[in-house]
Image (spheres, rainbow, N blue to C red):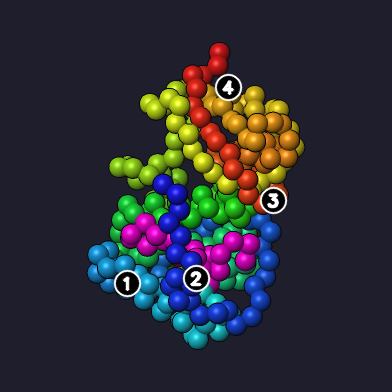
């Protein structure tokens, strides 16, 4: 499932009170919770999610004196991802001196009311993680807020999930397998807008084929193909650096090569 992004204009976000600091790249993501009571009613009413995100922005701007909501993205129980500060903008929620290391992604759970993250919330957090890896030059780390700052955030249930490696919940939404075994849907095609660039596209084509993939990017080896290979590299959790504009590529399954 592609990310279901709720843009700032769609949740009627206030304009920031100043310019964001540029975030060229990051180690990964820090996961957060609200730290207050979250009405369980948001699970059945997405309008309440919108109202909650707007109230968080107001608190951060009017209470904390920040220029905007402190989070990069917010995942809600309808598997929607709210755009906060967004890509390549320094968050404010990770703590002094720690914001440049990671994007900040909030899951809409708290310390009372809705405490246990639902599967759609976990999927939304991971959709945001995939988004910042693919489009925001984020690395593979997924950590809790408390890993870098003295806080209860992101709460024990959400932090326990982070400590387990932040797995996709069962029942759909999981990414395709990355190992050498052939998947159950031969010939399936996936579209993705790569934003990475790197060096040795021939090496990566070889590695992808060994893992059971065929990668077709613009029909030739060149900058677009290199970017596509590196984007796939990022998707599989291997570090790559750099950002370029999006191109379209197709990934198809094939039997593993011996």
Dots 1, 3 in contact, CB < 8 A: no
Q: Label 4 belongs to which residue?
A: 210
Query: In which image quadrant can residue 36 be found?
Result: bottom left
Instruction: Estimate the x, y position of residue 20 in percent, counting from the top left.
Output: 64, 73
Please state the extent of the stretch shown in magenta in the rendering.
70-89
| View extreme (front): residue | 219
C-alpha gap between disc 2 and disc 4: 42 Å
Q: Viewer-nearest of labels 4 and 3?
A: 3
Whichever of labels 2 and 4 marks the residue nearer the N terminus, that label is: 2
Residue 154 or 1: which is nearer the viewer?
Answer: 1
Whichever of labels 1 and 3 marks the residue nearer the N terminus, that label is: 1
Whichever of labels 2 and 3 marks the residue nearer the N terminus, that label is: 2
Residue 184 higher or lower than 49, as above or below:
above
Residue 182 or 148: which is nearer the viewer?
Answer: 182
Q: Is residue 163 visible?
A: no
Circle 1: is it few (<14), some (14-19), or many (20+) Cα within 10 Å?
few
C-alpha gap between disc 1 and disc 4: 47 Å
Q: Label 2 belongs to which residue?
A: 8
Instruction: Estimate the x, y position of residue 40 in percent, counting from the top left.
Output: 25, 68
Residue at x-position 49% and y-position 38%: 190
Q: Label 1 belongs to which residue?
A: 47
C-alpha gap between disc 4 and disc 3: 27 Å
C-alpha gap between disc 1 and disc 2: 15 Å
Q: Which mark is residue 244?
A: 3
């Amino acid at each position: 499932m592609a990310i279901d992004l709720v843009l700032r204009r769609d949740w009627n976000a206030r304009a920031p009170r100043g310019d964001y600091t540029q975030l060229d790249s990051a180690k990964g993501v820090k996961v957060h919770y609200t730290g207050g009571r979250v009405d369980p009613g948001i699970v059945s009413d997405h309008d309440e999610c919108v109202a909650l995100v707007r109230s968080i922005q107001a608190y951060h701007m009017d209470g904390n004196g920040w220029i905007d909501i402190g989070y990069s993205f917010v995942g809600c129980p309808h598997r929607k991802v709210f755009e906060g500060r967004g890509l390549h903008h320094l968050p404010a929620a990770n703590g002094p001196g720690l914001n440049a290391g990671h994007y900040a992604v909030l899951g809409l759970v708290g310390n009372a009311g809705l405490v246990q993250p639902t599967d759609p919330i976990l999927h939304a957090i991971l959709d945001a993680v995939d988004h910042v890896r693919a489009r925001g030059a984020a690395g593979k780390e997924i950590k809790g807020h408390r890993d870098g700052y003295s806080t209860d955030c992101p709460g024990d249930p959400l932090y326990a999930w982070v400590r387990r490696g932040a797995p996709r919940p069962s029942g759909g939404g999981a990414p395709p397998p990355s190992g050498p075994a052939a998947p159950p849907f031969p010939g399936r095609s996936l579209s993705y807008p790569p934003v990475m660039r790197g060096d040795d596209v021939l090496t990566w084509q070889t590695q992808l084929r060994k893992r059971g993939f065929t990668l077709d990017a613009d029909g030739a080896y060149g900058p677009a193909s290199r970017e596509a290979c590196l984007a796939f590299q990022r998707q599989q959790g291997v570090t790559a650096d750099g950002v370029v504009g999006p191109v379209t590529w197709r990934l198809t399954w094939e039997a593993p090569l011996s």
